[in-house]
Amino acid sequence: MMSSEERLCREFAMIIGGQPGFAGGKCVATISRQQIRAFILGKKFGVTSSFSFESLNKRTGRALCLGRVALLQQETNRFLSAIREQGILVSSVHSEWLFERPRLVYVNIEAVEKPLIFARKIRKALNLSSKQTRLAPAK
């Protein structure tokens, strides 16, 4: 039988459009950007984004919610605007690689709120930022 935290994790991942899992005691939802043909130093590279929650307060239902989002350069501004408008903090915007093609931008985000509310905000921002490209669920 599935625990309430496992059910919450599955629903969190389903809203985001990712694969659920537990790592280090926290719920993690991973999205694969399979439609992006990315390469580092000429070798194929799998582009993924991940979202998590941990330290769930049973009384309030709030948790530490985090995300590491991989975006095409042209998606970044729309994503940043959409995420900040919803009250989620942007903790970093950076490139992780020197020789990747196409150029990828990574955005780290954080909030303390109910995980399903965070997931809905993430999905909305991803939908707004990826008008030309679709963030496909992980397989």
Image: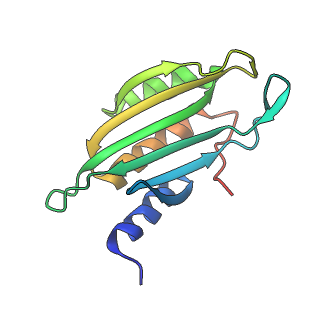
- Residue 27's place in the image compared with 37, above or below, is below
Q: Position of residue 6 (x, y in %)?
A: 40, 69
Farthest bottom residue?
A: 1
Picture coordinates of residue 15, whole percent (x, y)? 48, 56
Viewed as shown, does residue 105 lie left or right of 107?
right
Give the residue at the far left of this rendering: 59
Q: Nearer the viewer, residue 82 or 119?
A: 119
Q: Residue at x 65, y 53 (%)?
A: 138
Residue most toward the right? 42
Front in this rendered view, residue 74 or 95 = 95
For the point 39% across and 40% down, the residue is: 66
Q: Quadrant of residue 35?
A: top right
Name, please, the residue furthest toward the top: 98
Please name the colour scheme applied to the rendered image: rainbow
In the image, residue 100 lies at what x, y percent?
74, 21
Q: Position of residue 115 (x, y in %)?
A: 34, 52
**Residue occupying the point 36% across, 50% down:** 53
Please give left or right for residue 128 compared with residue 138 in the image.
left
> Looking at the image, which is closer to me, 106 or 73?
106
Report the quarter where the N terminus lies: bottom left
**40 in relation to 30, above or below:** above
Total marks placed: 0
